[in-house]
Amino acid sequence: MATLALKPTPEGIAAAVDLLRQGGLVAIPTETVYGLAADAANAEAVARLYEVKGRPAFNPLIAHVNGPEMAAREGEMRGAASYCAGFYWPGPLTLVVPAQQGGSTCALARAGLDTVALRHPSHSIAHDIITGLGRPLVAPSANRSGRISPVTPHDVYEELGESIDAIVDGGRCPVGVESTVVSFTGPEPALLRPGGLERDVLETFLGTPLAKPDPTASPSSPGQLARHYAPNATLRLDASGPEPGEVFVGFGAITGDYSLSENGVLKEAAANLFPLLRLMDRKHDRIAICPIPRHGLGEAINDRLKRATTREEDL
Ligand code: TXA
Ligand code: MG
């Protein structure tokens, strides 16, 4: 069956909910990137989702909720996790907490772990679809595993084509990098993946530095797979200028063939990152990128760039 293009109207949202209720896979906009959504309670739909993405089954999914009440049915929302949700939800923050007995997020979606990752997206279309279903939606980024995340419906189609049931058109995602993932399952809150909510903002709120992920804990994943977000082209980072045959990407005062943000604004660079990688990947084989500041959203940008440069043979 051909992939349906759904409009962000009440009818389009109702059609998306129907498809999801029947076990379908529907790409939906969120404020960060497009997610490939499935009913978190439907193990068969979740199995198909892993297959379509080519995602290793040991890499768990985020259950997207429509607020703290649905979150509390899925996971133990206590102490700092609950404060963070209260302050930063809805938004680009994912909280990993102990899974609640009797929660509806199936074991396959949690990769068999006794923890669950929860996020309340601020995008109204995502919110309305979750509310329509009345249960959480798992929604990994709607790209083939290891590839560049999609921020437009067109990107989703380029990644997944006819292998999914529908795409809801919500235009371009404003944040452009995925959510920040913080685990509250160890002795200290740990940053598992830098993302759309800056580390320093969270550290100030929590009054404590975020720990590094426990290397012995499973999964070893959060976008932690060394090669991820990767174009086919070769990327060279922290470049002071192009070498022969390279296209050069600048930032702020450093000018090049392209710029992540001519004004040197990290928020703009984050929103431009994946579309620019996708565009350049179509046209060029060798890409050099100037140094991008590492503070604030720069941490997530540098994280994605580093993973995009790791070659298969480096793993
Ligand atoms: O912004 C986002 O988070 C997007 C949008 C669509 O919401 N979603 C997204 O999902 O980036 P995904 O599946 O590409 O990334 C989820 C990350 C993975 O790195 C996964 O390993 C981690 O969350 N994760 C999920 N459950 C976990 C758990 N129980 N423990 C540790 N990490 C977990
Ligand atoms: Mg992803």
Image (cartoon, grey):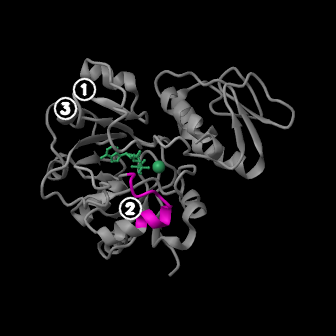
| Res 83 label | 3
Q: Is residue 307 above or below residue 278?
A: above
Q: Is residue 29 left or right of residue 239?
A: left
Instruction: Give the vertical position of 243 relative to 71 (above or below).
Output: above
Mark 1 secondary-structure assignment: loop
Q: Which residue is mark 2?
A: 37
Secondary structure beneath label 3: helix
The residue drawn where x is 30% and y is 68% is: 43
Q: Position of residue 187 (x, y in %)?
A: 21, 28
Query: Left or right: 74 with respect to 217?
Result: left
| Secondary structure at numbered mark 2 | strand
| Tag 1: amino acid | Glu
Instruction: Choose the circle earlier in sequence order: 1 or 2.
Output: 2
Query: Which residue is outermost to the front?
Result: 216
Asked if labels 2 and 3 touch by Cβ distance under 8 angstroms, the answer is no
Residue 217 numbered tag: none
Using residue 56 as the reference point, say whether residue 109 is left or right of it.
left
Disc 2, ligand 1: is the CB inside 8 Å? no
Which badge, 1 or 3, comes first in the chain's sequence?
Answer: 3
Q: Which stretch did the figure color magenta?
A: 49-59
Kind of residue at badge 3: Tyr
Q: Would you name the residue on which mark 1 appears?
A: 188
78 falls in the magenta region: no
Separation (CA) of disc 3 from disc 2: 27 Å
Snapshot quadrant of residue 250: top right
- Relative to 37, is 302 above or below? above
Residue 239: give x, y in percent of width and height: 72, 25
107 in relation to 252, above or below: below
